[in-house]
Amino acid sequence: MSEVRILATGFGFPEGPVAMPDGSVILTEIRNNRCSRVAPDGKVSLFSATGGGPNGLAVGPDGALYLCNNGGSRYVEGHSMGVAPHPDYKHGFVQRLDRTTGTLTTLYIECDGHKLSAPNDLVFDKAGGFYFTDLGKRYARHRDHGGLYYALPDGSKIVCLAYPILSPNGCGLSPDGKTLYVADTEGSRLLAFDVEGPGVIAKSKGHAPHSGRVIGGVPGPARFDSLAVLANGNIAVATLTTGMITEFAPSGKIVREVKMPDIYPTNICFGGPDMRTAYITLSDKGQLAAMTWPEPGLKLNFN
């Protein structure tokens, strides 16, 4: 396994890295309420002052960036992770970011009359729509339910696919697009949903709240964050507390665990000419890291 290289530092809980064709990486800073661009030489610049709590980021069919914004969290000294909703929090939302100017357009703040709580991560399918997770906000004595949604990038349609889910976080599609993977944070479980068509997943059976089946997990004090799918179909899950990137086969078997120099590796994406450069956000220390992965990542639709 190759060495982990630190490309840039000084971020406020980085997440949502996207490897761009020019060799730069655009990522979100949840704590600093903004998106930043990391140039190939490591220089950091402001991409968009989004406000709220920018989290998952992806390139859409029009070349723009699409953002899951959790609405903002409250941070206290001694904790790198947010401890509660920000005092100004009202709801979460999904936004479109112009790739040239960074200009923001809000697309969705609710579904079926219910406000979005904390949109977290998204992935585009070949048809041009996107699946996204809503993690749900945590409060001192209770939490919002999480859910799984599908929406179109022009703001015309949003549907709820699975609700409730305890704490859905990262999401990604299998190479053939027939399986949607979702990482559940608090249970450190990897769920798989059968995709029957664009924005259509298999219905739940019996008394199950949704049709996601648990295909893998890790024991002990671990929590799952975001994920990326590899070209061979494996799923690399950023695992909190253990400080690992945990790679699963579609069967749920753990293929490898790669230790990171941080207890909160929160996300991973792939880039480079051979798609074997893994960019990993290290959020406790506020860093962007890179390393060569043994297998190439899956090239995402539209990116």
Image (tube, rainbow, N blue to C red):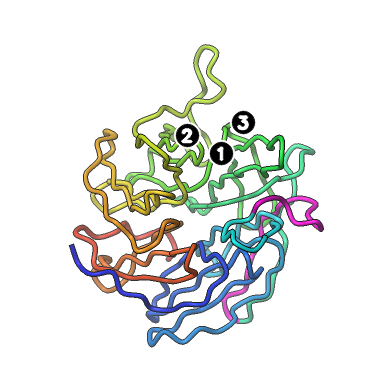
Q: Residue at x 42, y 42 (%)?
A: 222
Q: How many marks?
A: 3
Query: Which SS class for mark 3?
Result: strand
Q: Which residue is mark 1?
A: 167
Q: How far apart are the two marked residues, 1 and 3, measured between alpha carbons?
A: 11 Å
Quadrant where the C terminus is found in the figure? bottom left
Q: Which quarter of the rendering shows the N terminus? A: bottom left
**Rendering quarter of residue 49:** bottom right
Q: Main secondary structure of the magenta part?
A: loop
Q: Mark 1 vs mark 2: which is more N-terminal?
A: 1
Q: Nearer the viewer, residue 210 or 154?
A: 210
Nearest to the eye among marks 1 and 3: give it.
1
SS of the residue under disc 2: loop
Magenta highlight range: 83-100
The dot on residue 187 is 2
Return the disc, 3 or 2, that comes first in the chain's sequence. 3
Local crowd at mark 3 within 10 Å, few (<14), some, or many (≥20)?
some
Marks 1 and 2 sit apart, C-alpha to C-alpha, by: 8 Å
Q: Position of residue 10 (x, y in %)?
A: 52, 77
**Is residue 210 within the magenta segment?**
no
Amino acid on which disc 3 is placed: Tyr
Instruction: Name the amino acid, label 1.
Output: Ser
For the point 44% across and 63% down, which residue is it?
Answer: 302
Distance of label 3 from label 2 (alpha carbons) = 16 Å
Question: Judging from the image, what secondary structure is the residue with disc 1 in?
Answer: loop
Residue 263 percent coordinates (x, y): 42, 56
Q: Is 90 colored magenta in this rendering?
A: yes
